[in-house]
Image (cartoon, coloured by chain):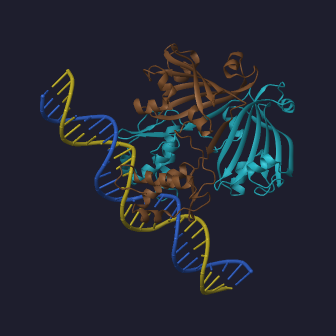
Chain colours: A brown, B cyan, C blue, D yellow
DNA sequence: AATGTATAGTTGTCTATACCAATATTATTT
DNA sequence: AAATAATATTGGTATAGACAACTATACATT
């Protein structure tokens, strides 16, 4: 289970191992884990290292601790978007649907004022504008337009966008994605959008704007999406920030 | 700054101190903090203790670390809802609006099937059903119905609900709120809702369902809200979960 | 029966130290 | 002047141990 010769950190190995036990049902919600000291002795690692693994899992919502009693498996594990920040593709897969895309256009244009402001670049600076119909099991789910500065991301291709933009940024460009902010609102679909989405004019839709940031706060991507309300609900899980912590 | 005789943990003292520096602008976004070893020497505490404080702040989005370079203040600190989980009241205040309420009814009824399922209680078990029009600067913003089991929360009054239900649960009942999950969708307003909200029939609205959980996973409150789309947008900030961590 | 006391087991905090990995800086070589 | 190598600095991982705070239980005392 724990391999001391592996280059993978011990605390991370233990973390993944426990996560597995939970996901496979070997550890059920409410169950107490073996005490920290027991793990330490069992695997011949120090208690602090065990604590580091536990702490991560507590932060991620898998476990909770009660001083003097023990460490327990949380009732509902907080849903963890796989890559941390969910893309449409991951989102659909998680819902058991087959994601797909239909490209409307892929252009480099002078930044419109809205996108320029969100991406904190000069107005009319060149940016990619990529519009796609997003499909789930072949049925239109959303109309999505991405705005990406050509400054940060060069040589973008349709292939990259259709694969995984995030993976490309992290693996190839060594950019670390840190966080995102979203604005969600309800609206009525426009005539043009209705056609793409194959819904009747005046039907309700959800407008979602997403901005993705790097660690130093630089915005890298601005996405505007129009989701069909009859096919899409948005789910969020929030964990409380507590004064005590680690 | 750091008081070794205080019962307050050292890492927490340091954490609060650094947080203060950031919030007062003494440490600006992008600034590098003094290295961990320097803090350790400065305050005669161990480096691991400094790391514990730093780690907390990294998890809360205040700081980010780059190995070999240093630790830096984040550009935009992830918005931290004051009480961790935002209530309507806090939400409106944060938007600079004056929150208000107009009670429609406050009853104890047998749990309808939907609420019973969400709260994981027996169908037709007694629950509070509280419906209010939520106002912002005196204008209807949302229609909100709370479902709360009488089992967990006894002796609930209109006053408590109008004050702060969360504060009552934590301070009086010693229940620790841990997390919440929400489902958001777009819809068209019904005739009855339209009247309460003073909008025209068929206008777009956002339906928000919220469930609040304790640490052990017990659901304590189920809230269904209908928000006017013309007056309300929903904002979320997500922080990426990274494989490495502590 | 109620209350105090002792004890063992658990997580929480903290120290001191060591070495590794990534980055930045300086010195050296070309 | 540029490239390379060596060194220093910084965060990352890990150890071993100590004591504090809290919980639960068993037992004794009142």
How many numbered marks appear?
0
Left of A88 or right of it: where is B173? right
Q: Position of residue A184 (x, y in %)?
A: 66, 30
**Quarter occupied by residue B100:** top right
The residue closer to the viewer here, A183 or A242, is: A183
- Whether residue B215 appears in this view of the structure is yes
Q: Nearer the viewer, residue B154 or A189?
A: A189
Q: Residue at x 61, y 26 (%)?
A: A134
Residue A3, position in %: x, y?
A: 38, 56
Q: Residue at x 57, y 65 (%)?
A: A69
| Residue A153 x/y as whole percent | 44, 23
B140 or A214: nearer the eye? A214
The percent position of residue B230, horizontal first and vertical second, equals 74, 25
Quadrant of res B162: top right
Nearer to me, A172 or B16 = A172
Q: Residue B143 appears in which quarter of the rendering?
A: top right
Residue A79 lies left or right of residue B175; in this view the side is: left
């Amino acid at each position: 289970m724990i391999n001391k010769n592996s280059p993978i950190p011990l605390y991370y190995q233990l973390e993944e191992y426990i996560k597995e036990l939970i996901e496979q049902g070997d550890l059920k919600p409410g169950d107490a884990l073996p005490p920290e000291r027991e793990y330490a002795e069992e695997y011949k690692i120090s208690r602090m290292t065990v604590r580091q693994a536990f702490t991560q899992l507590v932060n991620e919502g898998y476990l909770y601790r009660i001083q003097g009693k023990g460490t327990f498996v949380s009732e509902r594990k907080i849903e963890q978007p796989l890559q941390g920040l969910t893309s449409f593709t991951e989102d659909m897969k998680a819902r058991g649907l087959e994601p797909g895309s239909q490209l409307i256009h892929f252009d480099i244009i002078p930044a419109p004022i809205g996108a320029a402001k969100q991406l904190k670049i000069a107005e009319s600076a060149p940016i990619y504008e990529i519009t796609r119909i997003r499909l789930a099991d072949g049925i239109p789910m959303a109309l999505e337009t991405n705005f990406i500065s050509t400054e940060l991301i060069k040589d973008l291709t349709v292939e990259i966008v259709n694969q995984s933009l995030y993976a490309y940024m992290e693996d190839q460009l060594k950019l670390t994605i840190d966080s995102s902010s979203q604005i969600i609102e309800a609206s009525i679909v426009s005539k043009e959008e209705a056609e793409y989405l194959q819904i009747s004019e005046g039907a309700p839709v959800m407008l979602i704007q997403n901005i993705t940031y790097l660690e130093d706060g630089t915005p890298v991507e601005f996405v505007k999406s129009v989701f069909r309300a009859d096919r899409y609900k948005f789910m969020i899980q929030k964990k409380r920030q507590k004064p005590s912590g680690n």
